[in-house]
Amino acid sequence: MKKPVNQHNLEPDFNRPLFEVPIDIKRKIINILTLLYGSEVSRRIYPELERIMKVYYAYKCDDLIEWEKSFDKSEMFGQEDVILITYGDIIQNDSKKPLKVLADFCRDYFSNSFNTIHILPFFPYSSDRGFSVKDFEEVDHNLGTWSDIEDIGKDFKLMFDGVFNHISAKSKWFQEFLNGNPDFKNFFIVLSTSEMVSEDHLKLIVRPRTSSLFTEFQTIEGPKLVWTTFSPDQVDLNFHNPKVLIKMIDIFLTYVRRGADMIRLDAVTYLWEELGTDCVHLKQTHAIIKLFRVILDAVAPYVALITETNVPHEQNIQYFGNGYDEAQMVYNFALPPLVYHSFVTGKTNKLTKWAKTIKRISEQATYFNFLDSHDGIGLLPVKGILDNDDIDFLVYKTVERGGYISYRTDSDGSESPYELNITWYSAINGSDDETGEDQTIRVKRYIASRAIALFFLGVPGIYFHGLIGSKNDAEAVLKEKNTRSINREVIDGHTLREKLEDKDSISAQIVDNLNELINIRKNEALFQPNARQYVYEISEKLFAFVRKLDESDEFVLCIINVTRERVLFEIPDELTGKTKLFNELVSKRNINLGKNSKIEIDGYGIMLIKSSKKPA
């Protein structure tokens, strides 16, 4: 049964029976609230949380309620799921609002390849390209309206950002705090003097910035120091105050009502601050994620949580919980630097060793595989996977290829590389002028790097600038004094259409090649996100893995050459034992293989060798 197009009414329908919270759900919610605030406060605030759930449920259309009865959580993600990551205003022209331009563009060029669009924060904001939100419940009028968001949702699934860790210092909430409004008194973490926090406490706190942790603001009651993890304009919300949690849950369900199929919890690592700790990955943070998940399971089981936690891999995967009680998807942050390392060194040994540790989480949870985003390539996720020399080499290659490096302050006061700011095209190919390479080679290398994320266990996503092969925007970095601006260029819609219609352009060739690979993925059940994965060491120049379904003997062997050289490799004997006829999905040709069979793969080649049902 297909999910209905119309999912929520404009007004809540209280003529229907109200939603009854199941006893087990109520028990889970109260247990989480008790962990956060104690039993007395838990009992006091639960009724308000239940009311919010009932109001949300009253908005749901009858068709959606009926459809949910047959919804299977294990089928939340499929091989057809491919996510386009984009700003709402990444494409512009003079005649339409950016969200309408984006909708037209995606329908014209990407509707057969991408089924989900992650529109980066589209709310009114004051800084950080959308991540310093002034109003969580409004669409930035410069982009469009809620109707424009809902219109895109008619043809694509949607991912919204829950930027719940902090809010803009220009927001009404924070201005009311400055004005002394008692309703907002405890919405933020406030110190009267800097002496309230010892140097030892400050050294413990982990954060990805070099700016001051506390920012002084003038209030009606005099100067106050306020906790600002990311910047002076991004003020941390105080989840120690249950009113903050209740308000964010209300906003969370508003996003579901407005059409979100996935909600990305931005910077959720830092959600709960506790002096005397490192303020990351705290049990209270995990408890809040569990609370979001319990609520979704109760009133919107088809909506997925995805956590954005740019931290070492072992800590990152903790946000799956037990596979059923926290995020359904976690950003696979270790993948981009490892793929980058493989292509600049021509060796896959580090990538292969790590990939062997990646296993299926559960039938309801999987990885979000991406290579680039609106930010840079994070280095913390490969701490302990790549050594210091490897990191230094990536830093060197990034600067050599026109990129920048972002730093963070460590506990000892020193600074260390935190993020590589460079477009994925420039990272993989360097400067076209410097290399003098043929365009065919550059496109082939680029597509080979993309293939790893497209066929690896999980759901793939591609950032818009990665989709069209954008090069470094160094002018924007100098103009905006922000190294992340290198990968955030706003594109003229008419110019981009001309590029995509010109089949000799790099952008057109990259889009066409990616669309071809995406359609192979979408039409092959063996690429279901949670199909089993087995990684092989065939050659240090090749990255090789098998995808296989539990109930079938069929499999597909994925081989990606990270070098320019042709490589002769031997197929593992255990893969040729039951069949000798294979189909290569990229070239669409049959291959006969037996014991000790060897195949040659082109430089930067991609081979998807599928076992055949037909007898040899």
Image (cartoon, rainbow, N blue to C red):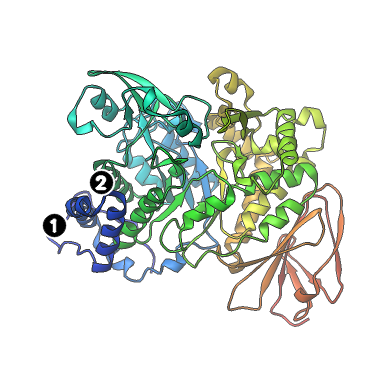
Task: Please name the residue shown 71% across and 75% down the image.
Answer: 612
Q: Residue furthest left?
A: 15
Q: Secondary structure at mark 2?
A: helix
The image position of residue 325, as x and y in percent, is 41, 61
Depth check: give the residue in front, 76 or 214.
Answer: 214
Depth check: give the residue in front, 243 or 505.
Answer: 243
Q: Is residue 228 left or right of residue 508?
A: left
Task: Please name the residue shown 45% across and 39% down the image.
Answer: 120
Depth check: give the residue in front, 599 or 530.
Answer: 530
Q: Is residue 595 left or right of residue 575?
A: right
Instruction: Rate crowding at label 1 as few (under 14), some (14 to 19) or many (20 or more) other CA atoms within 10 Å.
Output: few
Q: Of the residues shown, which amino acid type is indicated by label 1?
A: Phe
* Residue that badge 2 annotates: 246
The image position of residue 437, as x and y in percent, is 82, 36
Residue 249 visible? The answer is yes
Which mark, by number, is residue 14? Answer: 1
